[in-house]
Image (cartoon, helix red, strand yellow):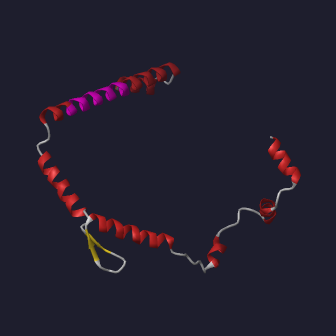
Amino acid sequence: MLNLEESDLLNTSDLSREELNKRQAEYIRLMNLQDNILKKKAQTRWFEEGDSNTKYFHSVIRERRRRLQLNRIKNHKNKWVQGSDKIAKAAIQHFKKLFNSPHYFNDFNILNSINPCITDDENNKFIAVPDLEEVKVVVSV
């Protein structure tokens, strides 16, 4: 590969560049092939020999699941609730209350920070009731 690069520096013809590009492409292809072979060997070795830390990793996963499990939560009355069914009901009640409560928006000044992208004329066209001719044109298509 070095010889081809050195000859390319000395000889800048299109043929030498084409030859160098072909060789580099072949070199990259062979390196990828070698990487794939090594990966397959590693997978085979792991499959045959196994992982000596499997027991440890499984215990770490079990501990994490245990730690992240919800055993109790506080309901809307600020009292602790235990048990899967009661926790589920408390969660549903919380989110129903959260999403079904009326939202009052009083600060309309924030809308002034939004740049209008529709002109007043365009807006008037959008909200105008179509006349009979426009309806006929759309329905006939």
Between 120 and 13, the one nearer to me in the picture: 120
Which residues, given as a range, are shown in magenta? Answer: 27-43
Between 82 and 115, the one nearer to me in the picture: 82
| Main secondary-structure element of the magenta-colored stretch | helix
Q: Is residue 62 left or right of residue 35?
A: left
Classify residue 127 by image quadrant.
bottom right
- In the image, residue 7 sits, relative to residue 126, either above or below, namely above
In the rendered structure, does residue 37 fall within the stretch colored magenta?
A: yes
Q: Is residue 70 left or right of residue 119?
A: left
- In the image, residue 141 sits, relative to residue 105, either above or below, namely above
**Residue visible at 81% across and 61% down in the picture:** 128
On-image quarter of the C terminus = top right
On-image quarter of the N terminus = top left
**Residue visible at 54% across and 75% down in the picture:** 102
Q: How many marks?
A: 0
**Residue visible at 19% across and 30% down in the picture:** 44
Between 115 and 1, the one nearer to me in the picture: 115
Q: Is residue 136 left or right of residue 104?
A: right
Between 72 and 32, the one nearer to me in the picture: 72
In the rendered structure, does residue 9 fall within the stretch colored magenta?
A: no
Q: Position of residue 111 (x, y in %)?
A: 64, 73
Q: Position of residue 12 (x, y in %)?
A: 50, 25
Q: Position of residue 91 (x, y in %)?
A: 37, 68
Q: Position of residue 75 (x, y in %)?
A: 34, 75
